[in-house]
Every structure is written in C-alpha cells, then in structure tokens.
Image (tube, coloured by chain):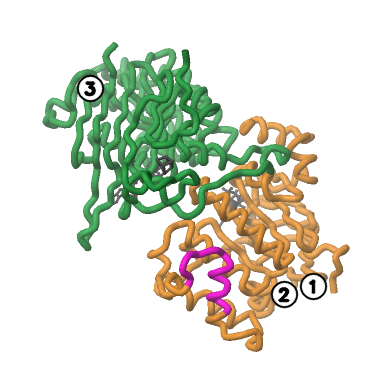
Amino acid sequence: MSTAFEPLLRVDGLTVAFGQEPPVVREVSFEVMPGETVGIVGESGSGKTMTALSIMRLLPPGGRIVRGSILFAGTPLHQYSEAQMRQVRGGDISMVFQDPFTCLNPVMRIGEQVAEAARLHRDRAEGDPYDLALQMLRAVHLPDPDRIARRYPHELSGGQRQRVMIAMAFICHPRLLIADEPSTALDVTVQLQILHLMREMQQQQRTAVLLITHDIGVVAYTCDRVLVMHEGQIVESGSVYEVLEHPRHPYTQRLLEAVA
Amino acid sequence: MQELVEMREVMVHFPLQRGETVRAVDGANLTLAPGEAVGLVGESGCGKSTLARALLRLVPLSAGEVWFDGKPLHRLPERELRPLRRQMQIVFQDPMASLNPRLRIGHILTEPLEVHGLARGKQAWQQAGRLLERVGLSPEYLNRYPHEFSGGQRQRICIARAIATQPRLLVADEPTSALDLSIRAQIHALLRDLQRELNMAILFVTHDLHAVRQVCSRVLVMYLGKMVESAPADRLFTAPAHPYTHALLDAVLEPKPSLARRPRNLPAGDVPTALRVPAGCRFHTRCPYAQERCRVEEPELRAAGEGHQVACHYPLSTETEP
Ligand SMILES: Nc1ncnc2c1ncn2[C@@H]1O[C@H](COP(=O)(O)OP(=O)(O)OP(=O)(O)O)[C@@H](O)[C@H]1O
Ligand SMILES: Nc1ncnc2c1ncn2[C@@H]1O[C@H](COP(=O)(O)OP(=O)(O)OP(=O)(O)O)[C@@H](O)[C@H]1O
Ligand code: SF4
Ligand SMILES: [Mg+2]
Ligand SMILES: [Mg+2]
C-alpha cells in the first residue's frame, strides 16, 4: 500500500525503442505523488507520448520497453500481463487523448458509453451504472445531461465531447489520470473551462495527473511540477516556479524564449 | 490612398442536406492597405479560412463584394482573374499537403515563374535559388524532394513559392500552427521581413495572439462569421473594446506560473455553431455584459477611437483620443 508520502507512480530508467533503432525514450526517471499534477513538455518527437503509452503498456506495434521499471502504488506494471493491464486501464489509471473522436464510439449513445465505463470499473452497490453516468455528466457541467446522454458523439460540439471524455475518465475514480494534449483542439476560451473542470474533478477525487502538452501556459496554469523532455531524455525537472521562472538547462531556456 | 483589398458585407453560406445552412461568413467587412500586415483572429470555426478563401475567390460568395486593387473580383470572369492571381498568393497550415512529393524543389519554385511568364530555363532555376536563399535555405536544396525537409523547412519552401511572383498580397492561413514553438518564431520573423522588404500586404490568419504581435500592425477579431473589432495591434492588446476580444485576450495563459494563475473572468458556455447563429448580438449568449437590447438588436461596427472599430452596444473602452 502506498501512503501520502510514497509516490503513486515511480518510473525508473525507462528506455523505449522500436526494433533495432536507437531508443526514442532514454533512461527516463520520475515520480508522481498522490494528488499531484505533473506536466511533461518538449518539442514534437521528444518522446512524451511514448513515455505515457509505456505506462499504460499501449506502445504501438514494434515498440517495446528495453529497460527500466514502472511501479504503480508499489506494483510493477512493466511485468504485468495483458489481462492484468486491462484491469488497470480505465480503472486505477485512465487516459484522455487530444482527439475525443478516437476514444468515443461513434455508434453508441453518450450515456451508454459513460455507463459502460461505470459497469466495468465501479461496484454495482454504488448504484445503477446509467444513473452514475448521468450524475457524472452533470458533474462535468454539461447542460441538460438527460438529453445529451441520448445523443451520439458527432452531435456534440468539441468542448462538449471533451467534457464527456473527462466524465468517462473520472467515473471510475482513477488514482492516476494521464492526459495527452487534452485541450489543444479546443478554442482558447473553452480550453480554460476544461482545464478548470479537470482540476475540480481532480481535487474532489484526489487524483494524480500526468499532463502532456506543447503549451507552456497550460503547464504554468495547472501543474505542480514539470519535466522537460528533449530527444528522449528528461533534461530538467522541478516545481513549475523553479523551472518556468528560472530555467537552468539551455534547452528549457530556448523553449521558454520562444514563447516569452 | 486606395485600399489594396476591400471586402464589403461578404457572405459565404454552405447549404446542408436537411435544409440547414452553415453561415460560415455572414456579413464580414475587411480592408487592407498596400503593404499592410493585418492579423485575423478568432476561435476555431468562426470563418477565418472561409473568408480568406473568399478573398482569393477560391470559394464562391453568397453575397457581398471583393475589390482588389480597384478591380471587382466578385464579378470578374475567370479569364480576367488569371493575370491577377500572381499578385495574390496563399500559404496554408500543412506544408506537406501543398507540395507535390514527386517534384524537386527546383521544379516547385520555377513552375510559378514559368506559368506567369516571368522567367524560364536556366534563368528561372537561378531565380529559384535566390528565392531559397531569401527564405533562409541553401540554393543547393533545389535538387532535393519535399520529404527530405523538416516541417519548418517545408513551410519556408511554401513561402518561397508564394513570393516567387512578387505578389502584392500574401494570405497566410495558420502557416505555423503545425510547427514547433521554436520554429514558429523564425517563420514569423521571416514573414515580417518579407512584408517590409517587398512592401507586400499580409493577411495573417491565426489562433495565436502572440504571433499576431510579432507580425501585424493591425488586428481583426472575428466571431461567428463577422468582424466584432478592428484596431491597431498595440491598442487591441492594451485596450480591447469588445467583450469577446477581452475574453480572448484574458484566456491566454502566460508561460510563467506567477502570471498564469491570476484570477480571470471567462465567458460561460460553448461557442454556438454557425448553423444556429443567435439573434441580436451574436455574442450575447456568452457575454457577461449582455443587456435586453443585445438580444434583439444587432450592433453595427462603429468608431471607437483612432483606427479602432467595434461592434458592441456597450463597449468596454471607447475613449476617443484627442
Ligand atoms: N510507431 C512508431 N514507429 C517508429 N517510431 C515511432 C513510432 N511512434 C513514434 N515513433 C518515434 O518515437 C519518437 C517519440 O515520439 P512521441 O510520439 O513520443 O513524441 P511526442 O513527444 O509525443 O511528440 P508530439 O509532441 O509531436 O506528440 C519520435 O521520434 C517518433 O518518430
Ligand atoms: N465546405 C463546407 N461545407 C460546410 N460547412 C463548411 C465548409 N467549410 C467550412 N464550413 C463550416 O464553416 C464554418 C467556418 O469554417 P472555417 O474553416 O472558415 O473556420 P476557421 O475560422 O478557419 O476555423 P479554424 O480556426 O478551425 O481553421 C465552420 O462551422 C465550418 O464547419
Ligand atoms: S452588444 Fe451586448 S452582448 Fe454583444 S458584446 Fe456588446 S454587451 Fe455583449
Ligand atoms: Mg505526442
Ligand atoms: Mg481555418
């Protein structure tokens, strides 16, 4: 069992490669404490998504963990079987992607999809899955949740779909949420609403968040700590105040100059 | 001085099957002076790309007028339009999609020169080399293919092709959204340099307010198919008059936590779609200052200071300068 003083997630020496190519993630080590929000930033191709997918054990075909360990609440995920991982995904750890279309089933009504997540990962004693789904759709501030629940994904706006994704991610009370570019496809004014919402849900449930993004402003706004990745390695890490206000590594300095 | 571009009450509507209509551009006005760099900002789906395409007559107008250098583009037949095309060029968001993967860079760059009869053969090839140099690439790249370049280099090639005919207007539709931050700044600097050196007007379409500051002297803000504010860049960023512009600026997250975490006043609710444009002021469903009048009466664009126009019944700051 982990306590508040032990990390919820401990990644140690993670190295990921495709075939015989040089590794795309190299000796990456970091920790996420319970309830903490940690950002990963870095330019395109620096290995952010591959790091996240390694934790979920969802690397694309040909990709593999060459070295390193991933401990989640003390259990070694890197040694888990696919059957064991299926229990973890969408349960203790859930993930939100940039494009909600890739994760929502286009031919299933919204309410059913959210209820399905509850059916798989929540105790039946907690209530009827469909009722839990409606509660959750209300909790993410969707207007008129009963009506929205009967719609299909394409009948919602981008911001509404993103809220549905967040409802699905939080309905199973995950201990860790991994969000890969969760708000970049949204309008700026709606993006802020979504980030607020994520924080609200996270505080209610004391969920830890690993947030991957290109947008330094999003990290400055929401994260406690940040990891800066460059060519597969973490080149700098620390509290957002240290790293973003007083960057030490030349790469971080360049990254920040580009947005200053 | 005569305007280079003038768009008056332009509408571009797309009919859908069920008798519904997407009002993508819905009565927009726009002017560009020769050599002027103007930013066009607004949220996804507000009609920026459609307006840009309407300006170049790449999409038919449902209503309104487009004047270019005193000529009525909206009623010129294609034959008379062709000679004008070399004076109006466009650069898109995705450089790979707009470069033919089977052509060498040299061919990509000499093609517009030959089509418009500006140069041919060896001379065109030399000119293509100079264009590459102008956008910061080595002329040795003329023999390479598009896939041999990074995203930022490809966008430079697209820009080189666009300026080959020495256009008087360059429309850049989110030219850097697909690029990394560090590379974006370089491309913005290149656009600004070219605009000054070639005295070329630029309509710079973007989500990125930071980029607008780097490139443009004037900014137009669009919401649901219509301009809501037009102002000199300095003024827009310091004294926005339209509540929507204010919200757009207020939603920008600064890269430092000490600034990013200040309190904000954000508009509630989702952006309405171009299928159901609200009556009255189209921002009233989300505007924190909306009054009864806003629900029924649509505000017209009117002066709010030097070079500053706003379409709002209750603008935030309208002090006219002495
Ligand atoms: N299926 C694959 N086969 C081979 N290489 C891959 C594959 N997927 C990703 N890579 C490589 O792994 C590296 C890291 O990619 P990753 O997707 O983690 O980058 P990222 O930091 O998430 O970038 P972005 O910000 O663009 O999403 C890149 O060099 C990429 O080309
Ligand atoms: N060919 C088309 N048929 C139907 N609707 C269209 C068509 N092209 C654009 N639209 C709609 O018109 C509206 C304006 O689209 P446009 O692409 O001009 O927006 P934009 O401001 O450029 O957005 P973005 O910032 O996402 O590029 C949107 O609602 C879009 O869905
Ligand atoms: S006209 Fe009214 S609703 Fe529209 S922006 Fe101005 S105050 Fe807001
Ligand atoms: Mg990625
Ligand atoms: Mg567009």
- Name the residue beneath numbered marker 1: A75
- First in residue order: circle 2 vs circle 1: 1
Report whether A50 appears left or right of A147: right
Q: Image quadrant of residue A49?
A: bottom right
Distance, label 1 to label 3, CA atoms, is 68 Å
Q: Is residue A139 magenta?
A: yes
Q: In the rendered view, would you say B47 is above or below B317?
A: below
Do tag 2 and tag 1 residues touch (Cβ < 8 Å)? Answer: yes
Q: Chain of mark 3?
A: B
| Range drawn in magenta | A132-145
Q: Is B81 one of the magenta-colored residues?
A: no
Q: Pointer 1 and pointer 3: residues touching (CB < 8 Å)?
A: no
Q: CA distance from mark 2 to mark 3?
A: 64 Å
Look at mark 3 in the image and give the residue it sits on.
Answer: B116
Mark 3, residues whose alpha carbon is within 10 Å: few (<14), some, or many (≥20)? Answer: some
Secondary element type, mark 2: loop
